[in-house]
Image (cartoon, coloured by chain):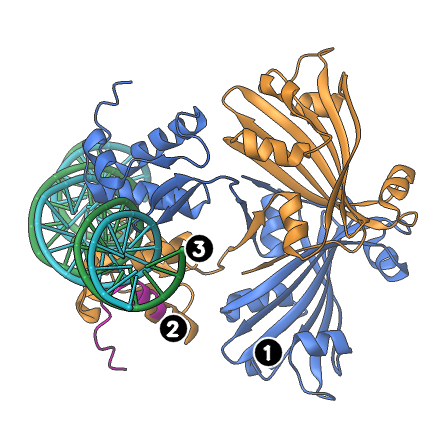
Chain colours: A orange, B blue, C cyan, D green
Amino acid sequence: MTTGELKNWQSVQDEVLRRIHARQWKPGDFIPNEEELSREFGCARATVNRALRGLAESGLLERKRKAGTRVALSPVRKAILDIPVIRREIEGKGRAYRYLLLSREEAVPPPDIRARMQSEPGRKLLHVISLHMADGRPYVFEDRWINPDTIPEIHEADFERQSPNEWLVMNTPFEGGDITFSAISASAREMTILACKAHEGLFVIDRSTWTGKGVITSVRLTFAPGYQMHTDI
Amino acid sequence: MTTGELKNWQSVQDEVLRRIHARQWKPGDFIPNEEELSREFGCARATVNRALRGLAESGLLERKRKAGTRVALSPVRKAILDIPVIRREIEGKGRAYRYLLLSREEAVPPPDIRARMQSEPGRKLLHVISLHMADGRPYVFEDRWINPDTIPEIHEADFERQSPNEWLVMNTPFEGGDITFSAISASAREMTILACKAHEGLFVIDRSTWTGKGVITSVRLTFAPGYQMHTDI
DNA sequence: TTGTTTTATATGTATAAACATAATAACGGT
DNA sequence: ACCGTTATTATGTTTATACATATAAAACAA
């Protein structure tokens, strides 16, 4: 195994990956320290650091100061999901996008939404219900609550033309949020709107986003039957 | 706005984030180049580079050589999901883990599995069906096909004691794979095994993993009703 | 033995300087 | 106006050096 000269961080990373996959370095093993590796590969320590840092971020290596670097025993694999704007997701599949506003009103939210949005009891929020269609067929049903206090500009938004999903992404860079994925069984409401059979299994995404000023919006996306979310690892 | 001295990459990153959120730098805007920022913040260009690279990786900035750095117009948000070993996931919730092997046999896989595993027609694969339980109740049902050609050691594995999920994670560092999340409606089989009602919506993960030698395993995890996958963004 | 302090060490970060690379913008010829 | 060539420039990477920081391990004290 004459390694030759690995003078850039990517080739160092590849070589480290190769050794892990070849089980030359097994899970739990400590690998040589940065200084040794840099000597072996004929590059600077910073280059090795750059390579190993990436592998540590992806969970394949565990690094601790003074202790050293070891191959992760049970690597917690990280799957990275892209959360695009729904219009783009549909158009990206080469299907025709259409959007339908079903209702828009100010209303007092139910307790679970109120709690999630840290809104005061009795306070009205904006409630927007809409449907995204692909090739003329229901794709996903969007049930969204918006806190106007955190985005006063929302009143100027025209949800007949642009979905709240898209409007919010374009107009309010959020600071954080959380997503929950789950499955439900189609009730009468979903049956009607998504044009599916009773009790079909439906994929659901619940998402809340916030800025420093508070929770902006909380949305439930209920997808038509057959929806799949896919990613590589 | 006396920025003072931002001498480490994290504080530079925080300041850049602050400006984006404060809409001082709006989506689509070009931000000053690394050299200017390093002068403004009183640090080295490498430090600015480190800060901005991270933000570009997370999709908030778009960088191009010569062109410069701009705030992403429609930031494709990335949700990072941890895919832990099931035992750890359950124990991590403070619940008692139990595992049950339901069946283990060599069999010719159905066409969809055969295609996904790039296995030859008529070739037998190892088929293992098992159940993971939390606090004595069904948690997830594991239906797995394994290609013994890519892992001969599999024959020594004792799936009475350790789930294939865990055995594989511990014994075969894979190089890549793909995951699909979806929802199904409980059929008679799931009803029996997961002890749920007919037609309940169930969360499903399909995952295949491979190494240089080919596809190792393809698994369907069918979760008991109420399962949620959660992450922050 | 047990708990506390010191020391050694591997990773983590910051810096300046140099060169590499991609891609825009300017130029020049037809 | 069009097309190919050449500068210019912002990001990307590598290097050596220095210092910061966490922490395991050794030394020490109770």
Q: Position of residue B122 (x, y in %)?
A: 74, 89
Q: Nearer the viewer, mark 3 or mark 1?
A: 3
Q: Quadrant of the C terminus of chain B?
A: top right
Q: Amino acid at mark 2?
A: Arg
**Location of mark 1 (residue):** B154
**Viewer-side residue, B123 vs A108:** A108
Residue B46: where, in percent of width, then height?
22, 45
Q: Where is mark 3, residue-wise?
A: A58
In front: mark 1 or mark 2?
2
Picture layout, residue C16 above or below residue A176: below
Asked if the residue at tag 1 contacts the one at tag 3, i.e. Cβ–Cβ closer than 8 Å, the answer is no
Q: Tell which subunit mark 2 falls on.
A: A
Query: Is residue B90 visible in the rendered structure shown here?
Result: no
In which quadrant of the rendered view does residue A125 lie?
top right
Q: Which residue is mark 2?
A: A18
Picture residue at 66% right of the left edge, 70% below the top: B218
Packing grade of label 2 (10 A; few <14, some 14-19, many >=20) is some
In the displayed structure, A214 sits above or below B54; it is above
Residues at badges 1 and 2 in contact (C-beta under 8 Å)? no
Say whether residue A203 is left or right of residue C14: right
Q: Chain of mark 1?
A: B
Which residue is nearer to you in this view: B176 or B127?
B176
Mark 3: amino acid: Ser
The chain holding disc 3 is A
**Identity of the residue drawn at 56% across and 21% down:** A214
Residue A11 sits inside the magenta stretch: yes
Residue range (magenta): A1-14
- The kind of residue tagged 1 is Ile
Asked if residue B101 is among those painted magenta in the image, a careful observer would answer no
Q: Nearer the viewer, residue A210 or B215?
A: A210
Residue under the point 60% across and 15% down = A149
Displayed quadrant of residue B71: top left
